[in-house]
């Protein structure tokens, strides 16, 4: 009754504000204008039926409703003839989306070509892009649209082909610089500051001076060695007309701008203005892809001149395919049909006769692994469309026994006609179109054996020189631009299986080689690659719900799960200067690549030599490339921790029974924070109270009550059968309470993130990593002591190795941290696991390469 009284009092209170009576005369006087307008609109017979206003109207609104059409807004002929003149201005001023062109118009050859050119403005397409886009996942990398991985094939069949057959990958994104000079010695002296003789060969490498070898070189910024690493490049010499020499430098697109900048500063070159670029606006649209490519060659060939040297930027003017596997040479013999001696009518073609004979006769039964690494061969071949088989057929595998090594003096000198820009353009200009080729085939009863285009190509042997066959042995095919799809389809019909970027990384991992730039931490290209990868992983991590995120710091003691932080790790082991002092002086972590020092460290780790104290003292901030092999279980992955075992670990391994192969080492949960201690204490008290209640309940269950009256419990029928409205109100109240709790938790989380962002370090990588709410940046714990075992390094590339049939990884360790190891025994732990696995550490001496 109280509720009813209260509700009545509320109604009475609301009724008090309402008027009891109204003066109609005064009410009508105040609204007389509005009533007049309403009567005028209703009684107006001049308006169109159904309209109640006569304000400014469009031509469409002047018509009766039954005559209105939607097409009148853009088609004047839909109006009645009497209204068209009045509606013409309105229809012309209206802005409507134009009707999209028909598919027939879009599929016209000219429009297809213009669309093909337009879509390459932001990211350049390789010549084999359309073929790859139908079969591979594509990604934007280094300014190119590149194939990332296959739709259907994983790495296992690719590895099988690389070891037994052949795989091919399009590496035409590599950038080539051609430096012409009169005296070779002057160019070598000018480029000497960019090289470090203790790490790799230099441009003065004598076996490469005659042009028969392509050699990898590691470039550094002048005067900054061992810091200032630029990246790996490959170079080869060639003899131009007369005494003019040319140096060809191949580099990766991720650091090509840095290499070009260093070359321009070292050689003192300036860019020439291209006259053709001003006239390009007046030229008509190209009629074919080849015509567009020829025009781009003339416009986009940047030339840099100096007092003694001249540099040509051959970017996107050459195609380069990389073949891996023992069947690389047999497949190329089927694909490449050399030009016969009788067909070499021009003078420059006569120079290839001996080279073609050497390929057809002396190298008939030779595999790529039997030739020295970097051997350069030049050939003159026919259009690959003429020799392309109609069906895929594997080449004959008759090379069971190895041939005797071929003397280096017998290798033919490569021809320099390939590097003539005008000659390459002439070859592309006389190339037969696909329609002309099909017409000629249709009118001929015999297969076509020759064509006007005689294509010069270059073969470069890629041999790891390790004594065993691996995934890195093969050959590179370099051809003029414009013939990419022809050679690629011919290789596919020759049964060479296509590979992508992820397959290339896995193949290099199987060959114990680091991938550039993803696995190189001390260069600008590698740092940018790691930063992009870190941002991508953090974005993916934060997109998951909170209850589906891995608690890296609280549960697994992983401080940097998505980055390496090499500077912090090296500074923790330096023991003298802080990280801020080192970074302010530009002396961050660097990779030790001195070959003699790596050999000394390798002997020391293997127990075959003394500890190199002088090397450790002079390279305290150095990172050493290492390889770890799992001794039992475990598959190390990227970002895994490489740790030093404790003395207790060695004792536990020694006390293992004979039937157990490995020790199970687990990382304990963190309990160093005061908040976590209070939470654990509160949770322990709550658990104790619950246990006491359960014990009391068990005792009550064991106790039998004899009094039946006390055993009866009154039951409410309202609780058994509640009203639906009451249930809905309860659910509504519970949902609101939950929403308030979530909003408060989100505010607390946002404040914690802002506080952690303000207290983070100034390093960009640390700031990006501190976005993770699970990582507590307030814990002042050194990087190397962030878990129960000392961290000495990280894994940059790891997985299950098919070559060794066990887990294997490549990574870097701090040079100063190697002193705590015993005979190379280490532990590794993945960032998503709490278990350590034993492994054996060895020094990796293979240098990065393209």
Image (tube, grey):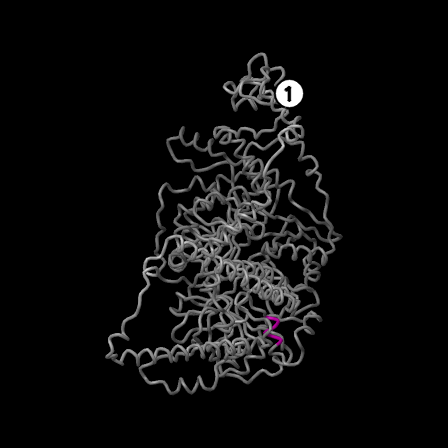
Task: Name the quadrant containing residue 734.
Answer: bottom left
**Circle 1 Cα neighbour tier, 10 Å, few/some/many (<14 / 14–19 / ≥20):** few
Percent position (x, y) of residue 88? 62, 18
The stretch in magenta equals: 566-571
Residue 120 in the image: above or below residue 365: above
Residue 148 in view here: yes
Query: Do we see residue 849 in this rendering?
Result: no
Q: Position of residue 318 (x, y in %)?
A: 56, 47
Q: Is 404 one of the magenta-colored residues?
A: no
Q: Which residue is more in the foreground, 84 or 390?
A: 84
- How many numbered marks have been drawn onto this rendered protein structure? 1
Residue 215 place in picture, x, y as percent: 57, 61
Looking at the rendered image, the quarter that the C terminus falls into is bottom right
Magenta: predominant secondary structure element? helix
Vertical relation: 389 (above or below) 89: below
Residue at 52% across / 36% down in the picture? 431
**Lateral position of residue 579 relative to residue 689, left or right:** right
At a point 56% along the width and 35% down the height, the residue shown is 114
Work out whether residue 156 or residue 608 is closer to the camera in this orientation and state it. Answer: 156
| Residue 268 left/right relative to 39 | right
- In the image shown, does 491 or 727 lie closer to the viewer? 727
Q: In which quarter of the image is residue 391?
A: top left
Q: Quadrant of the N terminus?
A: bottom left
Q: Position of residue 203 (x, y in %)?
A: 63, 62
Q: Which residue appears at 42% of the width and 64% of the height?
A: 469
Q: In this view, does 676 lie to the left or right of 584?
A: left
Q: Which residue lies furthest to the top in this view?
A: 82
Front residue of this view, candidates 756 and 795: 756
Image height of 828 relative to 822, above or below: above
Residue located 62% across and 57% down the image: 255
Judging by the rendered image, the residue that carries numbered circle 1 is 89
């Amino acid at each position: 009754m109280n509720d009813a009284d209260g509700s009545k009092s509320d109604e009475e209170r609301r009724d008090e504000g309402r008027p009891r009576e109204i003066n109609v005369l005064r009410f009508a006087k105040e609204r007389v204008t509005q009533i007049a307008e309403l009567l005028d609109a209703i009684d107006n017979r001049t308006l169109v039926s159904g309209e109640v206003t006569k304000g400014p109207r469009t031509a469409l609104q002047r018509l009766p409703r039954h005559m209105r059409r939607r097409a009148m807004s853009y088609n004047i002929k839909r109006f009645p003839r009497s209204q068209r003149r009045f509606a013409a201005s309105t229809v012309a001023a209206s802005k409507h989306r134009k009707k999209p062109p028909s598919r027939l118009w879009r599929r016209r050859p000219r429009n297809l070509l213009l669309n093909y050119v337009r879509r390459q403005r932001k990211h350049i397409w390789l010549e084999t892009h359309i073929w790859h886009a139908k079969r591979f996942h594509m990604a934007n990398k280094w300014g190119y649209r590149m194939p990332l991985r296959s739709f259907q094939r994983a790495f296992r069949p690719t590895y099988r082909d690389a070891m037994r057959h052949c795989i091919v990958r399009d590496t035409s994104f590599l950038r080539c610089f051609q430096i012409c000079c009169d005296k070779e010695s002057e160019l070598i002296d000018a480029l000497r500051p960019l090289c470090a003789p203790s790490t790799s060969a230099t441009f003065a490498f004598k076996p490469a001076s005659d042009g028969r070898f392509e050699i990898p070189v590691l470039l550094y910024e002048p005067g900054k060695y061992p810091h200032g690493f630029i990246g790996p490049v490959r170079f080869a010499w060639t003899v131009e007309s007369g005494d003019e020499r040319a140096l060809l430098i191949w580099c990766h697109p991720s650091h090509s701008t840095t290499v070009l900048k260093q070359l321009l500063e070292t050689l003192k070159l300036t860019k020439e203005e291209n006259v053709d670029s001003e006239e390009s606006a007046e030229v008509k649209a190209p009629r074919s892809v080849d015509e567009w490519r020829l025009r781009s060659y003339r416009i986009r060939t940047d030339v840099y001149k100096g007092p003694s040297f001249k540099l040509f930027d051959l970017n996107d003017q050459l195609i380069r395919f990389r073949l891996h596997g023992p069947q690389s040479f047999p497949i190329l013999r089927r694909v490449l049909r050399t030009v016969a001696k009788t067909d070499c009518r021009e003078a420059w073609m006569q120079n290839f006769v001996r080279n073609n004979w050497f390929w057809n006769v002396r190298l008939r039964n030779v595999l790529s692994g039997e030739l020295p690494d970097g051997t350069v061969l030049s050939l003159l071949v026919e259009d690959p469309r003429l020799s392309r088989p109609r069906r895929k057929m594997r080449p004959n595998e008759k090379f069971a026994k190895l041939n005797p090594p071929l003397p280096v003096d017998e290798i033919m000198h490569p021809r320099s006609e390939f590097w003539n820009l005008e000659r390459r353009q002439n070859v592309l200009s006389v190339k037969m179109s696909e329609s002309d080729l099909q017409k000629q085939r249709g009118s001929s009863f015999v297969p076509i054996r020759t064509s006007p285009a005689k294509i010069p190509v270059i073969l470069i042997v890629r041999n790891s020189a390790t004594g065993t066959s691996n995934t890195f042995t093969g050959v590179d095919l370099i051809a003029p631009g414009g013939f990419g799809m022809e050679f690629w389809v011919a290789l596919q019909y020759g049964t060479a299986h296509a590979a992508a970027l992820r397959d290339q990384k896995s193949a290099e991992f199987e060959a114990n080689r680091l991938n550039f730039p993803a696995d190189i931490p001390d260069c600008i290209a590698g740092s940018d690659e790691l930063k992009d990868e870190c941002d991508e992983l953090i974005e993916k991590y934060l997109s998951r719900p909170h209850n589906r995120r891995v608690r890296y710091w609280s549960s697994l003691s992983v401080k940097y799960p998505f980055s390496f932080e090499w500077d912090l790790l090296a500074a923790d082991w330096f023991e003298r200067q802080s990280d801020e002092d080192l970074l302010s002086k530009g002396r961050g972590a660097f990779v030790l690549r001195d070959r003699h020092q790596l050999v000394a460290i390798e002997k020391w780790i293997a127990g075959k030599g003394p500890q190199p104290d002088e090397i450790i003292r002079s390279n305290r901030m150095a990172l050493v490339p290492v390889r770890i092999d799992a001794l039992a279980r475990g598959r190390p992955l990227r970002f895994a921790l490489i740790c030093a075992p404790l003395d207790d670990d060695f004792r536990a391994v020694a006390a293992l029974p004979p039937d157990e192969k490995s020790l199970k080492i687990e990382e304990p949960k963190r309990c160093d924070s005061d908040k976590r201690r209070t939470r654990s204490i509160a949770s322990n008290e709550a658990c104790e109270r619950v246990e006491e209640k359960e014990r009391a309940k068990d005792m009550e269950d064991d106790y039998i009550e004899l009094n039946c009256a006390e055993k009866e419990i009154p039951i409410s029928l309202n609780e058994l059968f509640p009203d639906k409205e009451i249930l809905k109100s309860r659910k509504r109240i519970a949902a609101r309470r939950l929403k308030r709790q979530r909003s408060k938790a989100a505010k607390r989380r946002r404040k914690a993130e802002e506080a952690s962002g303000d207290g983070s370090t100034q390093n960009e990588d640390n700031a990006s990593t501190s976005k993770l709410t699970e990582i507590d940046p307030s814990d002042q714990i050194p990087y190397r002591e962030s878990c129960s075992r000392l961290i000495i390094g990280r894994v940059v590339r790891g997985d299950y190795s098919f070559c060794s049939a066990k887990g294997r990884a490549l990574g870097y360790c701090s040079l100063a941290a190697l002193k705590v190891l015993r005979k190379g025994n280490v532990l590794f732990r993945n960032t998503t696991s709490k278990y350590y696995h034993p492994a054996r550490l060895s020094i990796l001496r293979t240098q990065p390469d393209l």
